[in-house]
Each structure stands twice: as C-alpha cells, then as structure tokens.
Amino acid sequence: VPAAARPPGGLVLVVEDEPQIAEVLEAYLRRDGFGVARAGDGPSALHLHERVRPDLVLLDVMLPGLDGFEVLRRLRADRTRPSTPVILLTARDEDVDRISGLRTGADDYVVKPFSPPEVVARVQAVLRRARAAGTPAPLRLGPLEIDALGTAVRVHDVALDLTATEYRLLELLAGSPGRTFTRAQLLAAALPDSAALDRVVDAHLGNLRRKLAAAGAPAMIETVRGFGYRLGVPSAR
Ligand code: CA
C-alpha cells in the first residue's frame, strides 16, 4: 500500500481464521475510517505484514499454521524496524492467563466474544499511544512553543514567521533556558560559515525580540551585559 493511498485512520491488519468475525471487524473498522487488510492464518499474516506495513495488527491467538503468540514473537524478533502495535484477540481463559502472565509484547488484548465497537475503541487508543510515543514533544517555555520536528515556532498558539537565522538563535537559547550565550557562540550556531561580526547577532536578536513581543511574549530574550544573551526562564504557572 503506497503511503499516498493510506487511509486517514491508518491501516489495520486483521488476522483471524473465522471469516464472520473478520468481516464484522473489517466493516466496523472501515466505518471509522480505517483501511483493512486480512489474513486467515499465521504464515500469510507475516507475509502480509511485510508487504503492506500496517499501522496496527489485530491478531487472533488460535490460528492455523502458526498461532498468534508465534506470529507476535516473529514480528517482535525483527529489530531492524519499529515494531507494529499488536492487539491480541483471545477466546479462552488460558490465553488470558498466558497473555497477562507473560511478556508477550502485545500492546493490548480483547477477549471473545467482544463487541466490535469496543475493539475499534481499543485500536484507536493503542494507535494514539503509539503515535504520541513516536512524536517528540514540542519544547514549551511559557507562551513559547518550538516544534521539535520542523521549524515551527508559536507564541500563545500563533505561528511566528522567523528567518532561518532567527530560528537557529531561538532554538539555541531555548535549548538551555537561563544559560547565557556569548555573541560568538550565537554566531557559531546561527551563521556557522560566515565571517559576520558580533553586531550581526545583535541585529538578528533585535528582530527576533520584536517578533516575540508582537506575538505577546516580550522580554523573553534578556541581555546579559558584558557577556551576551539568554532566554529568561518563565515563571511556572
Ligand atoms: Ca481463531
């Protein structure tokens, strides 16, 4: 499944040898915006997992070929890739004992007979957790928020339009709030290949201060006379 064709909710691989159960799960998942791939036994589950790279696997424990525990063990054995979240579908009390007693590596499990909406809710919860764990949290300092993934900076939830140099300066200052950086350090971080003078840093920081102030965060960047600049540590609220 090419990335562009991925359904908005994510792609779920349903591994279940009982067709009626698989069909009901597929219908409920699709209704909630998920794409669905289906496998009816262990070996084809592994094959399909390799081919379609699902966002989550709903994995029945009692399967022909390889049982769900073995499929899960093999999925987890591949340490070259980030592991796919797995929810086990289990029918029996013994399975539950085994799932809860052993470290199977499953993210959650559901006991049959289940209600399909409950399964969909578990799928959504596990995917939320997995996505939250995979995304670095933005850096937050008082009203200031710096996106760890890109170059987005927000003040009071309003995006600032910064130049690359201003962004690098702010990123450096905000990475160590309260620490004073010399102009030479700021220059090295923001304009590494330039022979710019220290006063260039003053000019860029002046612009940055104006933008922060206009967005409602004045006085965040402090001048430390004789040394350089620092980002003030906002008081806890
Ligand atoms: Ca089964």
Image (cartoon, rainbow, N blue to C red):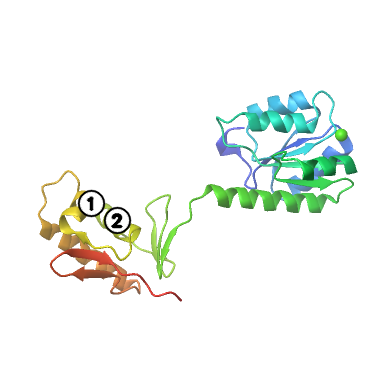
Q: Closer to the observer: label 2 or label 1?
A: 2
Do the CB atoms of the residues marked 2 and 1 lie less than 8 Å apart? yes
Give coordinates of residue 90: x percent, y percent.
84, 41
Residue 82 vertical placement versus 174 (above, below): above
Residue 146 vertical placement versus 157 (above, below): above
The answer to whether residue 226 is seen in the rendering is yes
State left or right for residue 151 relative to residue 224.
Answer: right
Q: CA distance from mark 2 to mark 1?
A: 9 Å
Relative depth, front residue between 71 and 217:
71
Q: Which residue is mark 2?
A: 172
Q: Which residue is mark 1?
A: 190
**SS at mark 1 in the image:** helix
User: Where's ligand 1: which quadrant?
Assistant: top right
Give coordinates of residue 25: x percent, y percent.
81, 43
Residue occupying the point 61% across, 37% down: 83
Relative depth, front residue between 102 and 5:
102
Give coordinates of residue 73: x percent, y percent.
70, 31
